[in-house]
Amino acid sequence: MEIKVIGAGLAGSEAAWQLAQRGFSVTLYEMKPKKMTPAHHSEDFAELVCSNSLRGDRLENAVGLLKEELRRCGSLILACADATRVEAGGCLAVDRGGFSRMVTEKIRCHPGITVVSEEVTAVPQGPVIVATGPLTSEPMSQAIGEYFGQDYLHFFDAAAPLVTAESIDMDLAWWQSRYDRGTPDYINCALNREEYEAFVRELTAAQEAEVHGFEDANVFEGCMPVEVMARRGFETLRYGPLKPVGLRDPRTGAEPYAVVQLRQDNAEKTVFNMVGFQTHLKFGEQKRVFSMIPALREAEFVRYGVMHRNTFLQSPKLLDRYYADRRDPMVAFAGQMTGVEGYVESTASGFLAAVAMAARLSGREAPDFPRETAIGALGLYVSDRTVENFQPMNVNFSIISPLEKRVRKKAEKNLAIANRSLEIIDALVSAGI
């Protein structure tokens, strides 16, 4: 049986490889070199933006755990990354050209994979995995929009940063809704006048991220970045996202000078959104400036704010935990268009979409990657219908099931979560996923 895979980025290449390794005939469609995007610089598959794009490699880091899971599951992308690794401390950095060439060679030389160099402009009948990426061509974007309905396809991110609940200093923050209306749904982080002045001063001077040629300059019109608001006047934020009216600091019993509100971002209340903090600042600048908020001095950012062009699906309404269309499991999607952020996460989505489709086509149940694993947690996040205001996210420990026992030191806790996950992965591999 032939399975189509659309797109030869990391997700598509991984998906094609996993299907072919399981004995299926795969036709991999890639529009390069006939049609390129501003992000493409070579004809090879699985291009990376920089040598360090695969990020950290320690098990105490969630993306390091995800990479180790993929290694143990026989990932093509991780095998090629390890083979082309260059020295970079605790990160998995690669020779970008060598990495892409190796992925391309292995794909093209696999007897079960046929590569077709042409643009696909419609969602084919299944079995198919669509992995056309965040820079999906306009005709294919339109086709996906028509397939699901345009309301389910977004063309840019305008997302505020997310922080972990455990990293918020609750000695300085408190739960309260404005004017005490309803349940206390927000965590409030107060700033006095001096703290507010210093915060605004640094925010207005912070460095913004570059605007690339493929980004939509109009993205900022519908949602103003917080740093732009701050530049419009010293008091602007106090009448906008940092307004203190209707709130009282329990430490003083009085209305604070300014307040940053945090809203829960998942049902477990392990991740919180910085309300109104859409931003185009560089990630390092976000960490530096937003950590000036007293209750967030030790904040762990699991996603930084972004404002850039990005095609992604409202996946919780559309896809199951294996990235397949809830209406038709023989049509699956993979990569950043599903709402996973990052190259390793894209690889994981391509892997899981492929192994699930292979199992279903063989008359078996899709393998159970539970929330205790990074691979499973990502799929469950993307398909979680309880998530409000769904936005793309990197893998992080807050979406993985916590330990049953309390471990005080963060590194030890994360390592224990990683070891538990790898035991599950090893059992799945032994069972023949």
Image (cartoon, helix red, strand yellow):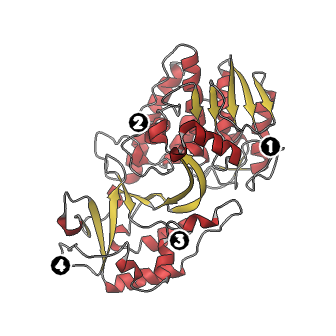
**Structural distance between the alpha carbons of marks 3 and 4:** 31 Å
**Mark 3 surroundings within 10 Å by alpha-carbon count, few (fewer than 14), some (14 through 19), many (20 or more):** some
- Residue designated by label 3: 285
| Camera-nearest label, 1 or 2 | 1
Quarter assignment of residue 335: top right
- Point out the residue furthest to the top here: 363
**Structural distance between the alpha carbons of marks 3 and 2:** 32 Å
Q: Secondary structure at mark 4?
A: loop
Please report contact status of discs 3 and 4: CB closer than 8 Å, yes or no. Answer: no
- Residue designated by label 4: 252
Q: Which mark is residue 240?
A: none
Tell me which numbered mark, 1 or 2, is placed earlier along the sequence: 1
Q: Secondary structure at mark 3?
A: helix
Above or below, 223 relative to 410: below
**Structural distance between the alpha carbons of marks 1 and 2:** 36 Å
Q: Which mark is residue 371?
A: 2
Quarter assignment of residue 177: bottom left
Q: Which mark is residue 32?
A: 1
Please tell me which residue is depicted at 42% across the width and 84% down the height of the picture: 198
| Camera-nearest label, 3 or 1 | 1
Q: Quadrant of the N terminus?
A: top right
- The x and y percentages for residue 418 are 45, 40
**Mark 2 surroundings within 10 Å by alpha-carbon count, few (fewer than 14), some (14 through 19), many (20 or more):** some
Please tell me which residue is depicted at 36% across the width and 68% down the height of the picture: 296
**Structural distance between the alpha carbons of marks 4 and 2:** 42 Å
Q: Which amino acid type is marked by label 4?
A: Thr
Above or below, 56 relative to 307: above
